[in-house]
Amino acid sequence: MTFRNGLDSLLRPEDSVVVLIDHQPFQLTNLNSHDPHMAINNAAALAATAKAFDVPVVLTSVLEAQGGVIFPQITSQFPGQEVINRTFINTWEDQKVVDVVKATGRKQLIIAGLYTEICVAMPAIQAAGEGWDVTVVTDASGGVSLEAHQVAIQRMIAAGVNMITWMAVLGEWQRDWARTEKLPAAVEVMKQYAGASGIAFLWEQQLLNTPVPAKAVR
């Protein structure tokens, strides 16, 4: 296995493509590794981050008629975009998904989905074996138990897959606060999805925009 290290191992928006897998109501009913509210928030945050940095996002569901549609917190960010509905449990065996990803010309494949141990691990391990630079966003994914989620992570790491969280994705894509082109959009994502970090930023802006009281006239 080739270890990821050095500057070139970090994520770059121009080389990244995101695949969001099976963020659907049926899967959410047995999500036990994460708080469901956080799983929804973090998946939507990853989608919003990709949109902010002009990174292509592929949306895919499995047996949508039975399992429900992708969370609206995700699909509403990409109005009119097709959700690829599969029968394959392993997304990477669905040729339509693979063809859409390949058409982007990008090799840094970023995956998140439900469940980590099945619908994330299968395509991540297969794609890594085919030479893709695969990263899994662990906090935008989740399993039927904490053990299932953690064992899946260990299994994928052993297969050469990188692990990351959604805010770390934003940090690697931004890389330098002096890069101002995408900064306003990135800040909006932080304000909307980053919890206390977003609130702290708003507070900082409030303080910066608060006039210094005039000295009392004696």
Image (tube, grey):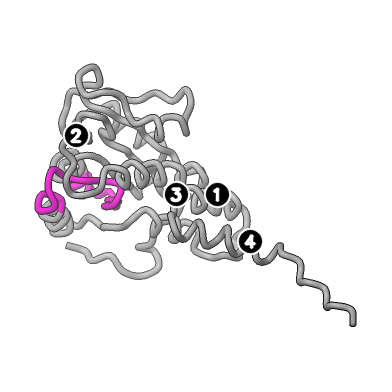
**Label 4 Cα neighbours within 10 Å, binned few <14 / some 14-19 / many ≥20:** few
Q: Which residue is mark 4?
A: 205
Amino acid on which disc 1 is placed: Glu
Q: Which residue is mark 3?
A: 193
* Disc nearer the start of the sequence (2/3): 2
Amino acid on which disc 3 is placed: Tyr
Q: In the image, which residues are magenta? A: 124-149
* Disc nearer the start of the sequence (3/4): 3
Quote the CA–CA distance across marks 4 and 1: 13 Å
Provide the secondary structure element on which disc 4 rests.
helix
**Residue 29: which disc?**
2
User: Residue 38: x percent and y percent?
Assistant: 32, 47
**Label 2 Cα neighbours within 10 Å, binned few <14 / some 14-19 / many ≥20:** few
Quote the CA–CA distance across marks 3 and 4: 17 Å
Count of all numbered marks drawn on residues in the image? 4
Q: Which residue is mark 1?
A: 188
Q: Residue at x 26, y 57 (%)?
A: 163
Q: Residue at x 31, y 43 (%)?
A: 37
C-beta proximity under 8 Å, tags 2 and 4: no
User: Residue 47: x percent and y percent?
Assistant: 41, 41
Quote the CA–CA distance across marks 1 and 2: 30 Å
Amino acid on which disc 4 is placed: Gln
Residue 104 covered by magenta stretch:
no
Q: Could you tell me if residue 134 is visible in this image? A: no
Q: Quadrant of residue 2?
A: bottom left
